């Protein structure tokens, strides 16, 4: 590595990167640079702590690109990124000890188990004489800052959002200038170095669609934001529901990995102006993300327990066959299959489609929302512990401030309303592309000769529905009433 910019006489400071893989608006990095000491930039892939949810396959693919991008950026400042694999509780104090680091800087995490891990690391650092400092860098505000008059946390989004908007969100920070780095020897923690190629799928390589759809990285994130603010934001209110067009921001995976910060998005949208209805609606979506993080901070059971307690007694069905049909986009319900195939191919799914497939799984198939949450966590490039669980609990009706369970989407009506020309279905379920009108949305009700003309044999070229929509709805309502 180039020696330019190194100050080897001073002890280093460690910046521990986590879900914040960027240089701009990075309070932990800013605090480390302000010390004037040379930097060690660190990332630890911790698959060894059972309390933490491991990254899914699509998130690992994304992480590979995000780490490569951060390393390139640091390289342009004559630095590098040290990536390690193992227990963070062992490796962070060990790195600090072996390099004589003065202090370690990181961003606070939200889940109780993550915070407990950080506390244990802080104690280990303190014991060996290393300082540490945490900052809030992955959310808009410290989650303890927004409280009811009684000092409790909010459980309803509208009340939370009103109280939140009375607070001042800090301005995003610029990228720090004049970075200097501590020289790292090849032997330093050599046995724990992360082989980043292991993050990529190989047997089989299922990521071709992800590569065609996405380019991870900080610069790319800001280009997405700029394009959205300039072109799509004003009609976001309507555009976010139109399945066949790019009406959403597609910023979610960049937010999940921290290639861009919520404060940077907040500031860009505030500049757009409160008079812009699309900007206002999009800001409230950023607010919903914040509410998910806030809820995870205050309710550690969010990812694996129904927050509406009565739903813990819900008689969910166990059906491997139906679950697999849903995962593979082979339910026989075209709008559901289109969403699930888009997810598998691109690692992402349109906002409206997520609601449709979520409602279908938890209501029509009466399968536990946790099965859907786990599948999304494995297949989404934007998988985020808080948002994923919060949104699944919302659509399943099991969460706090959730859509009521008895609000059961009719997938056919949803398709007709939000994909009126059928372009989304035709793109992702091409075996139906010769059908038109109502037939495209309900092939099971299509006349035999129309199916023949379109080259479709139900049960062979396209599945029959795994459930009758009316029967599925009635079954869900009976289960709900049993509570």
Image (tube, rainbow, N blue to C red):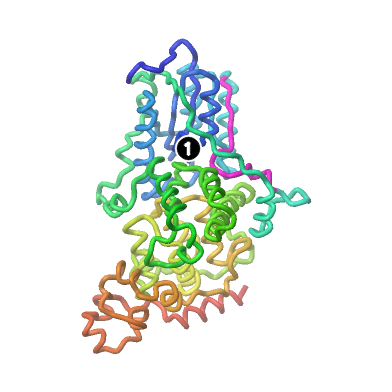
- Residue count near mark 1 (Cα–Cα under 10 Å), binned few <14, some 14–19, many ≥20: some
In which quadrant of the rendered image does the N terminus lie?
top left
User: What is the quadrant of residue 35 in the picture?
Assistant: top right
In the image, 465 versus 356, the foreground residue is 356
**SS category of the residue bearing label 1:** loop
In which quadrant of the rendered image does the C terminus lie?
bottom right
- The residue that appears at 28% across and 75% down in the rendered structure is 432
Residue 338 placement (x, y as % from top left): 35, 68
- The residue that appears at 39% across and 29% down in the rendered structure is 74
Q: Is residue 107 above or below residue 419?
A: above
In the image, 202 versus 34, the foreground residue is 34
In the image, 2 versus 131, the foreground residue is 2
- The residue that appears at 39% across and 24% down in the rendered structure is 189
Q: Which residue is mark 1?
A: 18
User: What is the quadrant of residue 186 in the picture?
Assistant: top left
Report whether residue 320 is seen: no
Q: Which residues are magenta?
A: 130-146
């Amino acid at each position: 590595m180039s020696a330019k910019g190194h100050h080897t006489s001073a002890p280093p400071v460690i910046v521990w990167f986590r879900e914040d893989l960027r240089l701009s608006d990075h309070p932990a990095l800013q605090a480390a640079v302000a010390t004037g000491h040379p930097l060690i930039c660190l990332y630890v892939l911790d698959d060894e702590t059972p309390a933490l949810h491991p990254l899914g396959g699509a998130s690992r693919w994304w992480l590979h690109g995000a780490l490569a991008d951060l390393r390139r950026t640091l390289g342009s400042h004559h630095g590098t990124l040290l990536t390690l694999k193992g227990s963070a509780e062992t490796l962070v104090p060990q790195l600090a000890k072996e390099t004589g680091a003065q202090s370690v800087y990181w961003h606070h995490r939200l889940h109780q188990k993550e915070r407990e891990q950080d506390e244990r690391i802080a104690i280990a650092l303190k014991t060996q004489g290393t300082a540490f400092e945490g900052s809030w860098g992955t959310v808009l505000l410290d989650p303890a800052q927004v409280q009811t008059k009684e000092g409790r946390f909010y459980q309803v989004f509208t009340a939370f959002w009103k109280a939140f908007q009375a607070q001042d969100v800090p301005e995003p920070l610029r990228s720090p200038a004049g970075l200097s780095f501590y020289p790292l020897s090849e032997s330093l923690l050599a046995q724990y170095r992360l082989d980043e190629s292991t993050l990529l799928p190989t047997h089989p390589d299922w990521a071709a669609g992800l590569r065609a759809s996405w380019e991870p990285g900080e610069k790319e994130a800001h280009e997405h934001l700029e394009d959205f603010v300039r072109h799509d934001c004003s009609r976001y209110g309507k555009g976010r529901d139109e399945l066949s067009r790019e009406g959403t921001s597609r910023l979610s995976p960049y937010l999940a990995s921290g290639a861009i910060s919520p404060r940077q998005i907040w500031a860009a949208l505030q500049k757009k102006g409160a008079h812009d209805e699309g900007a206002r609606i999009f800001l409230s979506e950023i607010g919903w993300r914040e509410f998910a993080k806030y809820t995870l901070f205050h309710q550690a059971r969010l990812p694996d327990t129904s927050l509406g307690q009565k739903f813990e007694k819900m008689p969910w069905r166990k059906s491997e066959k139906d679950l697999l049909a849903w995962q593979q986009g082979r339910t026989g319900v075209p709008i559901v299959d289109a969403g699930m195939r888009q997810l598998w191919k691109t690692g992402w799914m349109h906002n409206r489609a997520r609601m449709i497939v979520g409602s279908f799984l938890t209501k029509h198939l009466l399968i536990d929302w946790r099965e859907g949450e786990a599948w999304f966590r494995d297949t989404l490039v934007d998988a985020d512990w808080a948002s994923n669980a919060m949104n699944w609990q919302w659509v399943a009706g099991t969460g706090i401030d959730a859509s009521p369970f008895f609000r059961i989407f009719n997938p056919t009506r949803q398709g007709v309303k939000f994909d009126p020309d059928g372009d989304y279905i035709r793109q992702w379920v091409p075996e139906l592309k010769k059908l038109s009108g109502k037939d495209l949305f309900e092939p099971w009700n299509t006349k035999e000769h129309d199916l023949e003309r379109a080259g479709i044999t139900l049960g062979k070229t396209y599945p029959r529905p795994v459930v009758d929509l009316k029967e599925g709805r009635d079954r869900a309502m009976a289960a709900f009433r049993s509570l």
